[in-house]
Image (cartoon, rainbow, N blue to C red):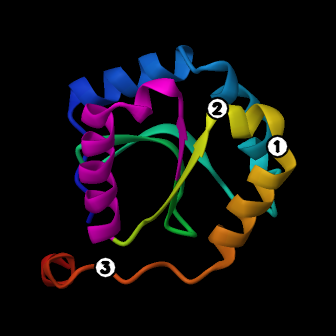
Amino acid sequence: MRERPTPLLTSRARKLRLQMTGAERKLWTALRAHRLAGLQFRRQVPCGPYIADFLCHAAKLVVEVDGATHSTLIERVRDARRDAWFEANGFAILRVTNMEVYAELDGVLETIRLRAEAPPPQSSPAARERE
């Protein structure tokens, strides 16, 4: 059974949906309504203690769109901690940059499709014990 997100996390996710970056909007236009290979993606969705930019539950895939701030040491450490949580809970993580979305959207979509078709990663022993 999934834990319900906290009201604060839900509120923050709603706010993020309203304030998506240009790159996130462009990618969402291509992903929404099962447009990519029939896959259902949700945007800015609470998942555990985090909010995933885009999440496909069926493929256990999280797609993160990173801007320039994700190149700082502090952000890379936060991203690594976040990625570790998602991976420990059975999700694959795909990170793309804003520039990749703007310059190579078709390539980004093909990469997402291929990752979604790959078998989901194995969860960690600790995550399997919780199940």
Q: Is residue 105 left or right of residue 129?
A: right
Looking at the rendering, which quadrant does residue 56 occupy? bottom right
Mark closer to the chain start, 2 or 1: 2
From the image, tell me which residue sits under label 3.
123
Q: Is residue 123 left or right of residue 17?
A: left
In terms of secondary structure, where does tag 2 sit? helix
Is residue 79 covered in magenta? yes
Question: Can residue 37 be seen from the camera position used here?
Answer: yes
Can residue 11 be found in the magenta stretch?
no
Q: Residue at x 34, y 22 (%)?
A: 12
Image spot of residue 125 (x, y percent):
18, 85
Circle nearer the viewer, 1 or 3? 1
* Quarter of the image where one finds residue 97: top right
Amino acid type of the residue tagged 1 in the rendering: Glu
Secondary element at tag 3: loop
- 129 left or right of 73? left
Location of mark 2 (residue) = 98
Q: Residue shown at 75%/51% (left/top)? A: 108
- The CA span between labels 1 and 3 is 31 Å
Q: Which residues are magenta?
A: 63-89
* Residue drawn where x is 31% and y is 79% of the image: 123
Q: Amino acid at mark 2?
A: Asn
In the image, residue 118 sits, relative to residue 10, either above or below, namely below
In space, the residues marked 2 and 3 are separated at their CA atoms by 29 Å
